[in-house]
Image: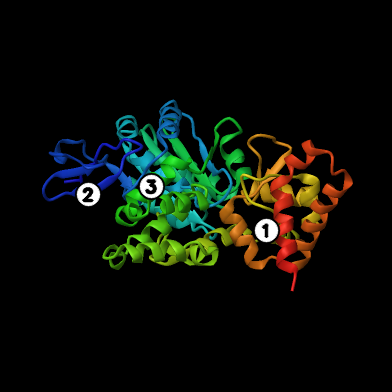
């Protein structure tokens, strides 16, 4: 008999699943008779298990469920940086009761990554569909065979972590009653796959859901110092991957014995280097390798031109969000062209400000990574740019107020450079 699928509501914490006793605990409330919930569909291929914690995405989940059921094939990209929870969101959607009810024949999942093995993914789907594609010479031929085998079935096809558009296109082999869901770090791939209207940017969590997630992951440590816990959640600006790593560190059993051990852990995590060194296994990964937050973000730099990589690290000179900066300042500090900076935006390593599309912003965690290889020259150019701007007209308070966070950052660099 297939395992049973728990009905999941976005914005809850799955604290415990006791399959032997038939109970599921959601946000502290025990629901009995899990066996009365619907069985998983006939085809359930490579779908990761539900995450233990999922908070702050209610409206986004509802929107995506509606899109998929309507027959659209949306693509999820990040709003700002990797680690925002695209894969987690896709897993939750795959398990969602409304999705399972509509796509009654099941879910096919393919995890790609930087070096995708599309033929193997197609072979896995083909085997589940009851066909053998081992003799077919090309991925395109295998994709067509899978499409033919799907026929009129109602399936959701999830293509996770796409790095190349052609790989994603080959796996878009559902029939007329199917929908596809893509996740990618690259906005250009998202738009190629889904078009502008169906390209959905996944934002970081707002302050309250971010704290709630950290508290769910490490309740005892957070209870010992609520103010420090809230400050830590704000430090990573609601990035789910960072919160998961921080929560795992704070939840270590030895830190629950004495409150001073929790306090020491919060102090230690104030160091950006320590935060970036925390590691976890990526949800949906095919192996058990541990990946640090720094390595996760650094993956997005691979295969970029040298100028773009250098520009990213130079951006570490800027004060991070909520501070913003102009394109002109970015060009002056990084010595990169507008085209190069646009490439960083497309790779979600730089973002346009929510309040003013003409201004740019850098997430706190990205700033932490950029500063690991920040060159003195970029610091000097940032300092010179903003101190010169103030000196141009010290009475122009409106202009100074707009750039005040960057001016303060310039003073920090100035003070740090003194012997």
Which callout, 1 or 2, points at the residue further toward the start of the chain?
A: 2
Residue hosting label 3: 213
Give the mark toward the camera: 2 or 3: 3
Closer to us: 377 or 138: 377
Q: Secondary structure at mark 2?
A: strand
Numbered tag placed on residue 340 in the rendering: none
Residue 195 lies, in percent from the top left, at 60, 34
Residue hosting label 1: 316
Label 3 close to label 1 by CB (< 8 Å)? no
Q: Is residue 392 above or below residue 376?
A: above
Quarter occupied by residue 282: bottom left
Location of the C terminus (image quadrant)? bottom right
In the displayed image of the protein, which residue is found farthest to the bottom?
A: 419
Q: Secondary structure at mark 1?
A: helix
Residue 24 lies, in percent from the top left, at 19, 43
Numbered tag placed on residue 16 in the rendering: 2
């Amino acid at each position: 008999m297939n395992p049973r699928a728990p009905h999941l509501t976005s914005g809850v914490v799955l604290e415990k699943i006791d399959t032997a006793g038939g109970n599921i605990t959601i946000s502290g409330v025990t629901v009995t008779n899990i066996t009365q919930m619907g069985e998983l569909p006939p085809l359930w291929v490579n779908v990761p298990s539900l995450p233990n914690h999922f908070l702050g995405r209610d409206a986004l989940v509802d929107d995506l469920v509606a899109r998929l059921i309507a027959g659209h094939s949306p693509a999820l990209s990040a709003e700002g940086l990797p680690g925002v929870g695209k894969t987690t969101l896709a897993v939750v959607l795959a398990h969602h009761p409304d999705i399972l009810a509509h796509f009654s024949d099941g879910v096919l999942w393919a995890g790609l990554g930087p070096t995708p093995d599309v033929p193997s993914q197609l072979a896995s789907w083909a085997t589940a569909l009851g066909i053998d594609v081992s003799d077919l010479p090309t991925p395109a031929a295998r994709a067509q065979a899978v499409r033919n085998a799907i026929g009129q079935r109602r399936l959701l096809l999830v293509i996770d972590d796409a790095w190349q558009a052609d790989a994603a296109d080959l796996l878009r082999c559902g029939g007329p009653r199917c929908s596809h869901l893509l996740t990618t770090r690259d906005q250009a791939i998202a738009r190629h796959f889904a078009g502008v209207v169906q390209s959905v940017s996944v934002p970081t969590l707002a302050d309250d859901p971010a704290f709630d997630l950290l508290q769910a992951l490490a309740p005892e440590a957070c209870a010992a110092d609520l103010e420090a816990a809230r400050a830590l959640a704000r430090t990573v600006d609601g990035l789910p991957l960072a919160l998961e790593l921080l929560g795992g560190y704070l939840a270590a059993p030895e830190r629950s014995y004495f409150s001073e051990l929790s306090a020491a852990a919060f102090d230690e995590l104030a160091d950006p280097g320590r935060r970036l060194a925390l590691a976890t296994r990526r949800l949906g990964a095919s192996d058990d390798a541990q990946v640090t937050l720094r390595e996760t973000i650094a993956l997005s730099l691979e295969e970029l031109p040298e100028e773009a990589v250098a520009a990213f690290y130079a951006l570490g000179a800027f004060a991070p969000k909520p501070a913003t900066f102009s394109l002109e300042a970015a060009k002056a500090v990084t010595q990169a062209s507008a085209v190069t900076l646009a490439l960083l935006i497309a790779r979600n390593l730089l973002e346009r400000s929510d309040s003013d599309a003409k201004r740019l912003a850098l997430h706190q965690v990205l700033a932490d990574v950029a500063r690991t290889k920040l060159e003195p020259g970029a610091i000097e150019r940032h300092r010179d740019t903003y101190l010169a701007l103030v000196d141009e007209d010290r009475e122009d308070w409106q202009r100074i107020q707009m750039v005040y966070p960057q001016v303060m950052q310039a003073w920090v660099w100035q003070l740090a450079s003194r012997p």
